[in-house]
């Protein structure tokens, strides 16, 4: 949604006309970017997929060369206590873009043919920045649904990113392990032959492509039953795909293809502020790194995929510098959730892990309510503004919405980004506290941080998180409350809940407040809007 959207225009107008005793900025800041004294910075968000807290050299990894991201960490602020809002992909991305907790829209892992989760009437950070004069693009993995109802992949696929504030999009529509395995550029599948129309089905097989079930001998990696649908590029996927052969991607080309699109966008928009959201596929499954990265680590495809992700980061950073834009660009690097080794394919990542610890000192992994589920690497880099350092501030990605809006000079109506606090000073390393409370979701239910205290609410049906154990991950699901003091127990081994009923009751009440939105005012107290 953009300034031309009447609803957003109206809410912005209302926000600007209501008296606001704490307003520091002139109300006109929202709609006159051309007249501002200094140009707001470009914003680039690198968003890795399933990269763990311990998966970068700068976060303690050995034998996993990540020099480009480590350089960002060295020259920027490296955060030790930063979090996605969830331990899986779709919900974390939902929060990053909308400034709302995932449960408000029942956001959970979506199938590859799901309708758009973020409908055009929802205000996203892309809308806000676009209204501030930014050129906006998303290049990479989407996984937030597309279209309305059933999608015709041969026609215009919308609504999608273009209807929620992005000027340009070049996408992996869902995940690489889900059909359709084709690129979507703006509203269209790239390279589709009209004589070979594409259709997608998640309930039963369609078309004549071999599947993992019918032709396991064709597979590069053995897959679990859920991942044993259509085979594309030697790998079976979740779901079935008919036609569209000319449009199939080759994963080995991802690094060149995605960095190429991002670079084209930066070049075309070098003379105005731009926002580039760059969600990687790596190191999510299936891991099929380009030939040049194969064997660059001793850890098999997962390690090699992380090296590939680092190379892509470096390539985009090099171009940013070549264009002379580095001084005035805020770069954020993070991940959508914690690590997993076998997430459906036996690709050797378990056997070849060696002594690498993808979650560092944290317990759990992707999907989990323990810290490794959503505590992720997070780096903010901006040579013109950010002083190098390390910050222990408690940060949530849900705050990017209000923080980036503030950075761009936008004032937001109270009705948008309702869970997002303006924590810009903390994100820039200028303030050390960050959030007072931090809320997280996982397949094992809800958790809340208050300083170093961590509360995991009891789950009615802990068995529903049982599938996580098959992946070698502790979900953290229990029908009892759990309370940990991370200042002395970072590995969440010592459940204090039994001996501290007061803390449990208080934290549970605060969590219920968030769930029931009684917390709205308090949740904003950490920063001005
Ligand atoms: C799960 C898939 C998993 C992965 C995940 C999405 C199982 C059995 N299967 O349904 O392989 O695709 O969805 O990952 O867990 S995410 O990072 O995009 O959330
Ligand atoms: Ca993910």
Image (cartoon, rainbow, N blue to C red):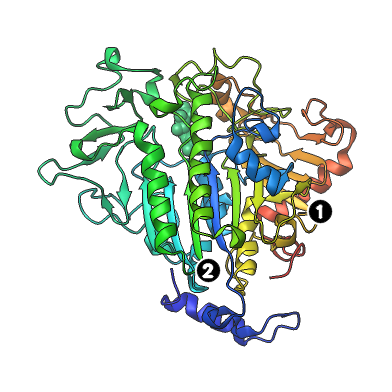
Q: Nearer the viewer, residue 272 or 341?
A: 272
In the figure, is residue 417 to the left or right of 251? right
Rendered location of residue 407, percent (x, y): 64, 67
Q: Residue at x 73, y 69 (%)?
A: 528
Q: Residue at x 41, y 77 (%)?
A: 4
Query: Which image quadrant: the N terminus?
Result: bottom left
In the figure, is residue 370 to the left or right of 4? right
Please say whether residue 46 is visible from this viewpoint.
Answer: yes
Rendered location of residue 401, percent (x, y): 60, 61
Rendered location of residue 525, percent (x, y): 77, 64
Image mark count: 2
For disc 2, does the CB lie below 8 Å from ligand 2? no
Q: Residue at x 81, y 34 (%)?
A: 484
Determine which residue is flagged by label 2: 128
Q: Residues within 10 Å of mark 2 (few under 14, many from 20)?
A: many
Determine which residue is flagged by label 1: 432
């Amino acid at each position: 949604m953009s300034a031309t959207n009447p609803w957003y225009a109206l809410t912005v107008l209302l926000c600007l006309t209501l008296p606001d005793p704490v307003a520091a900025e002139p109300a006109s800041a929202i709609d006159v970017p051309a007249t501002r004294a200094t140009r707001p910075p470009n914003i680039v968000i690198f968003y890795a997929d399933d990269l763990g807290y311990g998966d970068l050299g700068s976060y303690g990894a050995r034998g996993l060369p990540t020099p480009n991201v480590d350089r960002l960490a060295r020259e920027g602020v490296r955060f030790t206590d930063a979090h996605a809002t969830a331990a899986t992909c779709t919900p974390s991305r939902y929060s990053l873009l909308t400034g709302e907790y995932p449960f408000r829209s029942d956001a959970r892992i979506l199938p590859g043919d799901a309708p758009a989760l973020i409908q055009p009437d929802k205000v996203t950070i892309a809308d806000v920045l676009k209204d501030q004069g930014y050129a906006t693009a998303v290049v990479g993995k989407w996984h937030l649904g597309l279209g309305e109802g059933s999608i015709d992949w041969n026609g215009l696929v919308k609504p999608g990113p273009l209807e929620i504030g992005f000027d340009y999009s070049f996408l992996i529509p869902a995940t690489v392990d889900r059909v359709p395995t084709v690129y979507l550029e703006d509203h269209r599948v790239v390279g589709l032959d009209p004589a070979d129309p594409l259709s997608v089905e998640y309930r039963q097989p369609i078309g004549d492509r071999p599947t993992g079930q019918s032709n396991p001998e064709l597979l590069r990696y053995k897959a679990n039953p859920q991942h044993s649908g259509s085979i594309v590029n030697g790998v079976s996927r979740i779901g079935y795909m008919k036609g569209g052969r000319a449009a199939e991607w080759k994963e080995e080309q991802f690094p060149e293809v995605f960095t190429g699109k991002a670079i084209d966008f930066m070049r075309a928009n070098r003379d105005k502020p731009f926002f580039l959201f760059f969600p990687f596929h790596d190191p999510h499954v299936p891991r099929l790194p380009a030939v040049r990265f194969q064997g660059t680590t001793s850890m098999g495809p997962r390690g090699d995929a992380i090296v590939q992700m680092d190379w892509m980061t470096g390539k985009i950073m090099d171009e940013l510098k070549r264009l002379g834009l580095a001084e005035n660009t805020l770069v954020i690097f993070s991940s959508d959730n914690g690590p997993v080794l076998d997430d459906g394919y036996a690709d050797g990542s378990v056997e070849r892990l060696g002594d690498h610890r993808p979650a560092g000192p944290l317990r759990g992994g992707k999907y989990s309510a323990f810290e490794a589920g959503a505590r992720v690497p997070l780096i903010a880099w901006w040579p013109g503004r950010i002083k190098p350092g390390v910050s222990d501030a408690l940060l949530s990605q849900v705050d990017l919405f209000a923080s980036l809006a503030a950075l761009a000079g936008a004032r937001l109506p109270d009705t948008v980004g309702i869970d997002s606090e303006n924590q810009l000073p903390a994100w820039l390393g200028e303030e050390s506290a960050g959030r007072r409370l931090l809320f997280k979701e996982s397949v094992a239910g809800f958790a809340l941080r208050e300083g170093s205290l961590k509360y995991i609410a009891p789950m009615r049906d802990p068995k529903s998180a049982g599938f996580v154990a098959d992946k070698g991950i502790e979900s953290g699901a229990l029908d009892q409350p759990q309370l940990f003091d991370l200042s002395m127990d970072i590995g969440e081994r010592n459940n204090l809940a039994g001996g501290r009923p007061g803390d449990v009751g208080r934290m549970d009440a605060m969590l219920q407040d968030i769930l029931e939105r009684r917390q709205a005012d308090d949740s904003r107290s950490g920063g001005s809007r």
